[in-house]
Image (cartoon, rainbow, N blue to C red):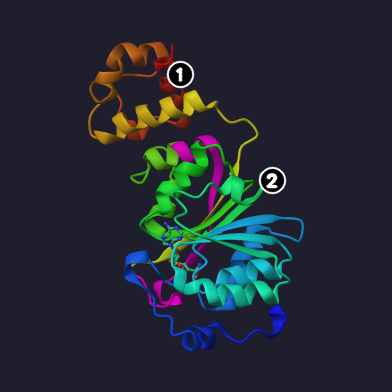
């Protein structure tokens, strides 16, 4: 059977008796029009290698395979292995499934060390941690097209002075350009989650700060946004307070939400020897 001949996902779910599990953050996209749109937004083509986290029953996986790309999918729930194996067969074995926890799997190794995109409808409980790992770890994807709860997507794309501006925005936008490219209502998922979702696309910038600066940025933003109502001289006290601000050329009398990304980078650099 080819990909085009595969039956609708709802049929396959019934045949395999697959019910969503809350503990794994399972909310499925069964409408191929939606998953194809996500694959289009990701800009994936036959030359590409894609890592998908949490393929579940494979709705997004199928759309990714339809582009001709090679897909390495990391899924924790073993119940989906048979349905994903059928999909792999229909796609001339361009799908490789790694059964395991995406937080622990070495994605770079899983794709054989080649550059890869990440496209995923992420499990809510581990989505932001996965993103931080990709942004700061050794495996920086060529691009990331990720479904999050809308509120989380807004935090990633937030601008200085926004209420949603925080650690996630600073770290994500230091490394990448980030843009919300699609909104999806809760009813688009089976079963529907409690909140709406959005797809955000992140593309790494041409120049990315070295790992030591990113680690310092994590420390500075954790301290500054950990007490976001306080002025920097007080929230950054443990890292040098007013002296650190002076060294970085940033006013100590402003709050974290008013410091632009370059300001945080200057503060991070000022903490380093
Ligand atoms: N991609 C599918 C779709 O769009 O219909 C399913 C998305 S569902 C929101 C999240 C998927 O991630 C589930 O299949 C779940 O089993 C899987 N998952 C949850 N935690 C995981 C983890 N730590 N590592 C890998 N997969 C995980």
Pick whichever of labels 1 and 2 is earlier in the sequence. 2
Query: SS class of the residue under badge 1?
Result: helix
Q: Quadrant of the image for the N terminus?
A: bottom right
Report x, y in % for residue 57: 51, 74
Do the residues bearing badges 1 and 2 touch, measured as CB atoms within 8 Å? no
Label ID, residue 269: 1
Q: Residue at x 49, y 73 (%)?
A: 80
Report x, y in % for residue 35: 58, 71
Label ID, residue 219: none
Q: Residue at x 29, y 14 (%)?
A: 242
Q: Nearer the viewer, mark 1 or mark 2?
A: 2
Question: Ligand 1 near label 2 (Cβ, under 8 Å)?
Answer: no
The residue lying toward the viewer, choosing from 233 and 23, is 23
Vertical order, 75 against 19 (above or below): above
Magenta-tinted stretch: 171-194
Q: Residue at x 29, y 29 (%)?
A: 223
Q: Residue at x 35, y 16 (%)?
A: 245
Vertical order, 171 against 253 (above or below): below
Q: Quadrant of residue 233?
A: top left
Circle 2 residue:
114
CA gap, disc 1 to disc 2? 31 Å
Q: Is residue 28 visible?
A: no
Relative horizontal placement of residue 52, taking residue 78 as reference (left or right):
right
Q: Is residue 76 visible?
A: yes
Q: Quadrant of residue 163?
A: top left
Residue 187 falls within the magenta-colored stretch? yes
Residue 170 falls within the magenta-colored stretch? no
Circle 1: is it few (<14), some (14-19), or many (20+) Cα within 10 Å?
many
Report x, y in % for residue 46: 76, 61
Circle 2: is it few (<14), some (14-19), or many (20+) Cα within 10 Å?
few
Relative horizontal placement of residue 5, taking residue 196 as reference (left or right):
right
- Quadrant location, ligand no. 1: bottom left
């Amino acid at each position: 059977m080819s990909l085009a001949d595969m039956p609708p996902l709802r049929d396959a779910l019934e045949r395999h008796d697959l019910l969503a599990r809350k503990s794994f953050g399972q909310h499925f996209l069964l409408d191929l029009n939606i998953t194809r749109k996500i694959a289009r937004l990701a800009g994936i083509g036959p030359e590409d290698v894609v890592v998908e986290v949490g393929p579940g029953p494979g709705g997004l996986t199928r759309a990714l395979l339809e582009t001709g790309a090679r897909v390495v999918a990391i899924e924790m729930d073993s119940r989906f292995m048979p349905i994903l194996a059928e999909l792999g067969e229909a796609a001339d074995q361009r799908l490789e499934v790694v059964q395991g926890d995406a937080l622990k799997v070495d994605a770079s190794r899983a794709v054989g060390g080649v550059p890869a995109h990440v496209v995923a409808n992420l499990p809510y409980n581990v989505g932001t941690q996965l993103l931080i790992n990709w942004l700061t770890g050794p495996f920086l994807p060529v691009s990331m097209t990720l479904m999050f709860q809308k509120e989380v997507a807004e935090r990633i794309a937030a601008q200085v002075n926004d209420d949603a501006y925080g650690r996630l925005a600073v770290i994500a936008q230091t490394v990448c350009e980030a843009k919300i490219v699609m909104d999806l209502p809760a009813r688009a998922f089976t079963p529907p989650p409690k909140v709406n979702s959005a797809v955000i696309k992140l593309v790494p910038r041409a120049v990315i700060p070295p790992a030591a600066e990113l680690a310092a940025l994590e420390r500075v933003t954790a301290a500054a946004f950990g007490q976001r109502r306080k002025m920097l001289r007080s929230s950054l006290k443990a890292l040098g307070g007013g002296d650190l601000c002076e060294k970085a050329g940033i006013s100590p009398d402003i709050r974290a939400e008013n410091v632009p990304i370059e300001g945080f980078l200057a503060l991070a650099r000022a903490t380093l020897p």
